[in-house]
Image (cartoon, rainbow, N blue to C red):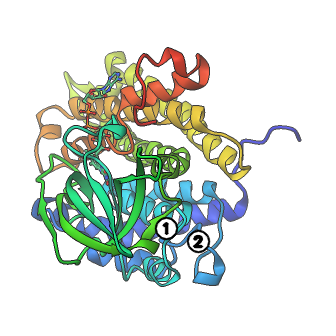
Amino acid sequence: MALDFSFTSQQDEFRAFVADFARREIQPHVREWDEKGIMPRHAIKKMGEVGLLGLIAPKSLGGAEADYVQLGIAIEEIGRIDTSCAMICSIQNTLPNLVPGWTDEIRRDVIRGKQLVSIATSETEAGSDVSNMETRADVDGNEYVINGRKIHVSLMPGATVMGVTAKVKQKDGSNRITFLRVPADLPGITCEEMPEMGTRSHQLGIVDFNNVRIPLDSVLGGEGEGKATLYARWNVSRCLSALNALGAAQQVLDDTISYVKKKKVYGQPIGMFQAISFPLIEHYTRIESCRLMAYKGLWLNTLNKNAAREAGMAKWSSITSSVQAIYDCLQMHGASGYLKELDIERRYRDVIALTFTGGTINVMKLTVIRELLGKEFMGISGAQG
Ligand SMILES: Cc1cc2nc3c(=O)[nH]c(=O)nc-3n(C[C@H](O)[C@H](O)[C@H](O)COP(=O)(O)OP(=O)(O)OC[C@H]3O[C@@H](n4cnc5c(N)ncnc54)[C@H](O)[C@@H]3O)c2cc1C
């Protein structure tokens, strides 16, 4: 058979396992984590115990050596229940395994949920425009000395080690972005939480670096190759963000189908009104086609093929489709959808976070323009993506 859209029986079993795990270990706590804005330590520990944080990690370190499609299944199923936990699972799988230079000790600990890694690259004037960053790492003897401020850093405070981008002066006098491994508890590091609209349990922080010293062998990837190192991970992580959003939208759509069959207005179930059922069908169709694109992107990554176009297309289309689907479902619940009592308002706040992580919707379109029309048609130089 030349073309096969089915998952294998092992993949189906794995999906059922993750779905059950998420319902038992994550769902009962989600509301409290959101209300208190606290990191889901319990879920992180449990995800580590059952192997969900080391899915693509090598067996020699305690991982499962599974492929990206399997990781996608995990993110989609966790995303059905909680966007924050799926984000955490995605970062812990991709950052230590797709970026070279983490120590084996850190990688083992991440797999078990004993340490958390985070990525600190955004700055006030360098979100999409990564090249514009001001954080510096100056060589002093056998150490780098880091100074600067990073913002919007996921899992901070909370992570034990960060991957930090900084400009390092090269022998030819140029400044090139370098990705550095930085323990979060070093002297000179301070962190303050940035309160968020959604995904409140994954935590977002401002991190200041004031003469922070790290050894020269702390480079992730190669010195001066920070941007290329970041890009290598995005082709996978953007497909995972897409599946995280799609999982949330699918769950909300499924719940809404049950609701519109029961809820009566003007004496009949509102699902009888085509102004309700037509949008539901349209959203189901969009979510299903976006899912195919996201898994195709992961499949291409598994084959070591360039998936920049698919990852960019999957991310912008999946996330905008999911945000719209959840919003429309919220409306179908009337004022109840707007209240805290139901889960939809949280799902809506949460999924919006994914429009920014790993590059905005517009930046995703720029990555696709680069692939389809050529870099010269992007209209800018040096944007993220
Ligand atoms: C929940 C969450 C988690 C995050 N986690 C992390 C993290 O772990 N680590 C980290 O470093 N950062 C993280 N970020 C930051 C994220 O990467 C940035 O928000 C994102 O890259 C966009 O940067 P910005 O917010 O500064 O927007 P800006 O770059 O200031 O862009 C502002 C607006 O202009 C648009 N725009 C920019 N350039 C163009 C262009 N050329 N053409 C058209 N439109 C354009 C953007 O799409 C956006 O709408 C996170 C953000 C959120 C919300």
> Label 2, on which residue?
57
158 is higher (above) or lower (below) than 167: below
Give percent across and percent down for residue 80. Answer: 40, 53
Q: Quadrant of ligand 1?
A: top left
Give percent across and percent down for residue 252. Answer: 34, 43
**Which residue does the image show at 53% across and 69% down from the upper left?**
17
How many tags in the picture? 2
**Which residue does the image show at 31% across and 61% down from the upper left?**
138
Give percent across and percent down for residue 86. Answer: 39, 58
Can the viewer see residue 60?
Answer: yes
Q: Amino acid at mark 1?
A: Pro
Foreground residue, 62 or 171?
Answer: 171
> Label 1, on which residue?
96
Q: Is residue 296 left or right of residue 345?
A: right
Q: Is residue 56 left or right of residue 20?
A: right
At mark 2, the secondary structure is loop
Does the CB distance between marks 2 and 1 fall below 8 Å? yes
